[in-house]
Amino acid sequence: MGAAAAGTRVFLEVRRRLQSALLVLGEPKEGGMSMDISITPCSLQVKTPEGCTELQLPAEVRLVPSSCGGLRYVPGDGLHLRLQVRAESNAKLVSMFNQSSQAQECCTFYCQSCGEVIIRDRELIRVLPLPSENWGALVEEWCCHPDPFANKPLHPQENDCFIGDSFFLVNLRSDLWQPRPELAPVETCCPSSENHFKLKPKANTKVICKRCKVMLGETMSSETTKLYMTEIIIQPSERNFPIIPRSQFVQSVIAQCLVELSTARSTFRFTVQGHDGKVYILLWILNSDSLVIESLRSSKSIKKFSLLEDVLKADSGSAWNAVKVLYQPCIKSRNEKLSSAWESDISIHSLTLPSATCLELLLILSRNNATLPPSLRYMNSFQEKGQ
């Protein structure tokens, strides 16, 4: 896919399931400037006196030029029009890395931020998903006798890896380097995907990377450690550590978690909370079948944070699968009433991440929201974002 160095900004959102697309052509710098638009099944071309912008579409997407309709002018955006597309509807959101551990495979766990080895050459014999957080409440419906699982937490053995919604549970071995923070007495309860162990509030249970000092997870018992998916890369031991820009990694992991949870549990609203228990973000999934194609992404009005520099370098033109979400920040006492209402709603799922990663995610959401055409950035009181 290519784009000319000068010309009009073009924004195209393709909905695979609906086989439709929204095309937004940015406003020219001078009012009343003529614009020549050419649409073919495999490309878009916009000519103005200032230059020409051309997009070559991915092979799996083809436009239907004769279906163009709904042309309207939106102040601040430019021209909007809709058209039909022929796009592969079975396109799947794929992580940029193979984060899923495979049983019977020797794996190495790395710190994603710096590449430090956390667990080396661990043979994983059992890789199992943990049950949902509400499974304990349903046991009485399954059993005609007292709960046989009461007070029996699922501790992974040496060659186990249990997978939760946003973390891995692994067993530590003394012959490997592991950060060993001091532990306060621990109370346990029946495990679930979000709440496996009840820790006393003041227990120092953080697992910190010894090289970059990033929080990787939490120690749950003397041998069991929770490692957050946003902080860890798991690779077959014969492969080298993959260098993935931090912001792209966080987006990929969170998008994958949201899609899998919404599909498996038919829930589309989430609270993102830190390991300190504070809610940082409210998320509402709109759809996960979008392909966004755009040229001349403007970043002039966006302050360059080091976290996002890798994304801002790709402003000339890009196409990517997107999970479209609405979000509300909950930092500095914002949206307290809404946050409280969501926390008490049993249909809303909670994702727990390190607090620093919650702030990173909020920054990424804000940055991506700012790159959308202005009319697409808000829906009612929510902000909209493609991830």
Image (tube, grey):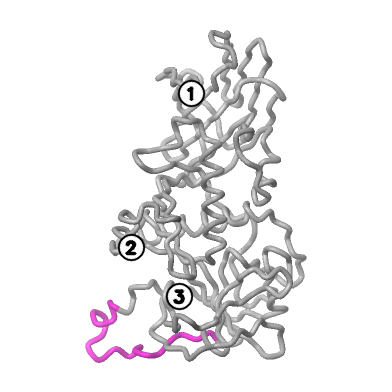
Please indicate, yes or no, whether residue 344 appears anywhere in the rendered image. Answer: yes
Which is more N-terminal, label 3 or label 1? Answer: 1
Residue marked by disc 1: 76
In this view, 44 is above or below 304: above
Mark 3 nearby-residue class (10 Å; few <14, some 14–19, many ≥20) = some
The type of residue carrying mark 1 is: Gly
Q: Is residue 155 magenta?
A: yes
Question: Callout 2, which amino acid?
Answer: Glu
Q: Name the residue that disc number 3 marks.
A: 130
Q: Which mark is residue 343?
A: 2
Tell me, yes or no, whether the two marked residues, 3 and 2, touch with CB atoms within 8 Å: no
Q: Which secondary structure dominates the residues rendered in magenta?
A: loop
Q: CA distance from mark 1 to mark 3?
A: 48 Å
| CA distance for labels 3 and 2 | 22 Å
Q: CA distance from mark 2 to mark 1?
A: 36 Å
Between 71 and 141, the residue placed more toward the observer is 71
Kind of element beneath mark 2: helix
Identify the residue at horizontal 34%, vertical 76% (top origin).
135
Magenta residues span 137-156
Q: Is residue 126 visible?
A: no
Q: Position of residue 285 (x, y in %)?
A: 41, 49
Residue 242 within the segment the image draws in magenta:
no
Quadrant housing the N terminus? top right
Callout 2: few (<14), some (14-19), or many (20+) C-alpha neighbours within 10 Å? some
Answer left or right for 125 relative to 220: right
Name the amino acid type tagged 3: Leu
